[in-house]
Image (cartoon, rainbow, N blue to C red):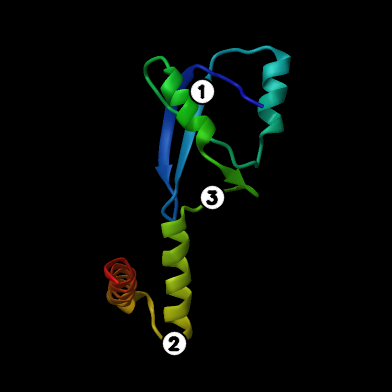
Amino acid sequence: MKIVLTGVLENISTRSDGSIKVVIGSQEMDESNAGQIFGLRNKFIKILLSDSNISEMEESLINEQQIQDGKKVKTKSQRMRAVLYRLHESNGGNADTFQAYYDERMELMIDQIKARIEA
């Protein structure tokens, strides 16, 4: 389902988890559009905010973003970082020492792949 709205960005606030809350006031709409919006309540959705018209390229970029099970799909590198964090945690590491661990492990993997290329 796709709904295009015009409106006013009325409020932005931060939340304790680092996310933000955006409040948008829309123009008046008919019952079917209002019903569609209520149908999206508590669902993970894609949003593009713009103070100009949305180009075809911008629209295609939005359509290409994957949503899976109510969450944005992680890139392969984001998944790798998350898995390395879990491995670091299982070996007794914590968030304070993770960046050094991550850098070391990534360099190790890069060197292994480079060695394969050179072989």
Q: Nearer the viewer, residue 107 or 29?
A: 107
Q: Residue at x 45, y 18 (%)?
A: 56
**Percent of width and height locating residue 74:** 50, 53
Q: Earlier in the sequence, mark 3 or mark 1?
A: 1
Q: Say which quarter of the image contains residue 67.
A: top right
Q: Earlier in the sequence, mark 1 or mark 2?
A: 1
In space, the residues marked 2 and 3 are separated at their CA atoms by 27 Å
Q: Nearer the viewer, residue 4 or 105?
A: 105
In front: label 1 or label 2: 2
Q: Which mark is residue 91?
A: 2
Q: Residues within 10 Å of mark 2 (few under 14, many from 20)?
A: few
**Residue 47 visible in this rendered orientation of the protein:** no
Q: Earlier in the sequence, mark 2 or mark 3?
A: 3
Q: Which residue is mark 1?
A: 25
**Percent of width and height locating residue 31:** 72, 15
Residue that extends furthest to the front in the rendered view of this protein: 119
Horizontal side of residue 59 vs 36, given as left or right = left
Q: Residues within 10 Å of mark 1 (few under 14, many from 20)?
A: few
Q: Say whether marks 3 and 1 touch (CB < 8 Å).
A: no
Q: Element under label 2? A: loop
Relative height, residue 72 to residue 108 (above, below): above
Q: Which residue is mark 3?
A: 73
